[in-house]
Amino acid sequence: MAVSGFLQENRVSVTSAILAVIFIILTPIVSIIGGFAAVSEVTTGDVATGAVTAGGTVVIAVVLALISAILQAVVFYQWGNVINNNIINTKHVFTHAKEQLQDPLRGEIGFFVNRLEDFLVQAWPFYIYLVLYIIAQFVGWYSFLLYLIGFVFLAIYLSKIFKATSKVSDMKDKIYSYLKGAKGYTSESYIYRISQRSVALVIILSVITLGIYWAYILIKLSMEINEYVASDEKVRPELEKMLTT
């Protein structure tokens, strides 16, 4: 009996990624507009109103930045969760199929399953980043140091995400194509390959573009992961049926 139909795939919330980008954009806009308004009030002699405007602007900007950070954290978590869930589901399918195959395909499937486990995304850097970010909200001048350390762990987590998304989609496309050829099976279905990315390059481009490239990555990678999962959902049942008949 096929197991693909009983496996549920997750999705990254592209809506959350888009909202995070919107709040990223709104934060500096509100800060600039509020800053000009406060300065204008002060220059006209209304210092009290200027102070209130400045204070209100800071509060609004902080709230917007916090909302953006929360939404980004949700998306970061979903990236790893969706990939890991897909890997686990694929392992279930191929472990079931392997039991009904003879060598050499049985050995090939076993090797593939073992390799998949190497690409499971370890979430501990993300949780350390999250804890440091939360603590940083309450420690005053030490917050910058915690932000910096947290950013390092976030970079580690993102490197694992980038590696997993690229390697898993590439490897699954190759093994699926190989198995189709070995069984003489033809199909127009294919595995969507997620672009390979470098964390260092993403950071550099994000700095150079003042965050614009980072906003692009948030949305683009979320869409790519969903497209990859959707393509895998389509191919996997076909392949399982082919291997078990």
Image: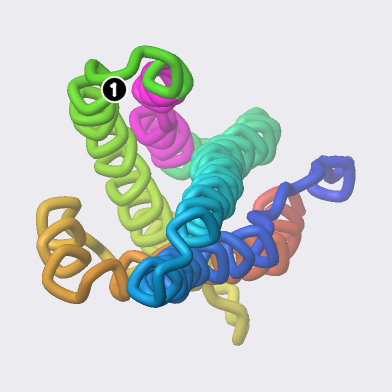
**What colour scheme was applied to this rendering of the protein?**
rainbow
Q: Nearer the viewer, residue 50 or 60?
A: 50
Local SS, label 1: helix
Q: Is residue 127 highlighted in magenta?
A: yes
Residue 88, picture quadrant: top right
Q: Nearer the viewer, residue 112 or 234?
A: 234
Whether residue 193 is visible: no
Residue range highlighted in magenta: 107-133
Judged left or right of residue 45, residue 187 is right
Q: Is residue 152 highlighted in magenta?
A: no
Percent across and percent down for residue 132 are: 37, 18
Q: Is residue 20 above or below residue 193?
A: above
Residue 141, picture quadrant: top left
Q: Residues within 10 Å of mark 1 (few under 14, many from 20)?
A: some
Amino acid carrying mark 1 in the image? Ser
Q: Main secondary structure of the magenta part?
A: helix
Residue reaching furthest front?
Answer: 45
The residue depicted at 67 percent of the width and 38 percent of the height is: 89
Whether residue 88 is visible: yes
Q: Nearer the viewer, residue 31 or 55?
A: 55
Q: Is residue 96 above or below residue 79?
A: above
Quadrant (top left, top right, bottom left, bottom right) of the C terminus: bottom right
Looking at the rendered structure, the number of numbered marks drawn on it comes to 1
The residue depicted at 35 percent of the width and 61 percent of the height is: 170
Q: Which residue is mark 1?
A: 143
The residue depicted at 17 percent of the width and 56 percent of the height is: 203
Percent across and percent down for residue 169 are: 42, 59
The residue depicted at 20 percent of the width and 23 percent of the height is: 149
Quadrant (top left, top right, bottom left, bottom right) of the N terminus: top right
Judged left or right of residue 100, residue 47 is left
